[in-house]
Image (spheres, rainbow, N blue to C red):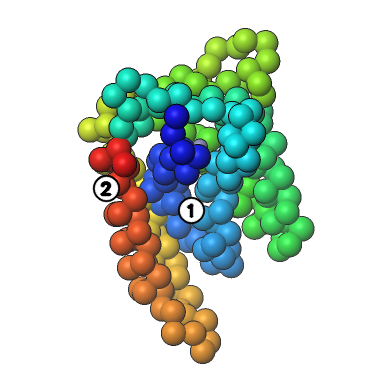
Amino acid sequence: MAAPADSGTKVITGHYGIGAGAKSLDHRAPLWCLMLATQWLDVVFIPLFLLGIETIEMLPGGGYGGVLIHADYTHSLLGSLVLSAAFGAVAWWRWDRRLGLLLGGVAFSHWVLDLIVHRGDMPILPGNAGDLPLLGFGLWRVPIVSIPLEAVLFLAGVFLYWRAARSVGPRPGSRVTPTLVTAALLVSGAIVLVLDALGI
Ligand SMILES: [Zn+2]
């Protein structure tokens, strides 16, 4: 049985790339909030995992993407739409409609990316009600494709972030420059992807 954090480290770099890239769509969206949005479904997964409602099944061999994730509520199509809408609604209330739609969309992008890599373990309805077909294109079976895909998504996202953040410039009085944040993103992303690829 994998540790709860384990599921969070799957596809993390690809998700983060989308979060960072979304900054270019609206500069007002704080980076922390974009990052939280990309991981929102997995954040909700953690308490359900600890309660034993959602589970992770290690496949023989394990390693990078070698898991079946029975996240039948948070990663069901309907469940993820509801969770993403809730995230977007809070952002709408906190800021405005535009940021609400953007952050809700980023939250749902998690499901879309998971759909590409998961091995047919994502139900349509919460709890796999009605026993409908399970979704997931299973790209994790082909790490030679999925790892570079994650890297490309991540690098493209960080580049878009860097370009957007640079055009806005650092906050007055702040020593944290966009280039510094970009460097930190790159280093942490590279570490996570390498650990992931090694199946650690
Ligand atoms: Zn996920």
Q: Nearer the viewer, residue 20 or 56?
A: 56
Question: Which quarter of the figure has residue 148?
Answer: top left
Q: Residue at x 27, y 47 (%)?
A: 194
Q: CA distance from mark 2 to mark 1?
A: 20 Å
Residue at position x 71%, y 63% in the image: 95
User: In this rendering, is residue 79 above or below 94?
Assistant: above
Which secondary structure lies at badge 2? helix
Q: Secondary structure at mark 1?
A: helix
Which disc, if any, is residue 36? none
Report the residue at 73% width, 54% height from top. Answer: 90
Q: Amino acid at mark 2?
A: Val
- Tell me the quadrant of the picture where the N terminus can be found: top left
Percent x, y for residue 128? 63, 17
Q: Is residue 167 left or right of residue 42?
A: left
Q: Does the beta carbon at disc 1 come under 8 Å from ligand 1?
A: no
Circles 2 and 1: CB distance less than 8 Å?
no
- Residue found farthest to the bottom: 173
Q: Position of residue 138 (x, y in %)?
A: 38, 23
Q: Position of residue 71 (x, y in %)?
A: 56, 28
Residue underneath mark 2: 194
Three-letter code, disc 1: Gly
Q: Nearer the viewer, mark 2 or mark 1?
A: 2
Q: Position of residue 84 (x, y in %)?
A: 64, 42
Q: Residue farthest to the left?
A: 144
Q: What is the total number of numbered labels drawn onto the structure image?
A: 2
In terms of sequence position, does the residue under pointer 2 or pointer 1 come before the other? 1
Which residue lies under the disc numbered 1? 19
Label 1, residues with CA under 10 Å away: few <14, some 14-19, many ≥20: many
Determine if residue 140 is in view. no
Q: Is residue 107 left or right of residue 136?
A: right
Is residue 47 depicted above or below 30 in this figure? above
| 40 relative position to 193: left or right | right
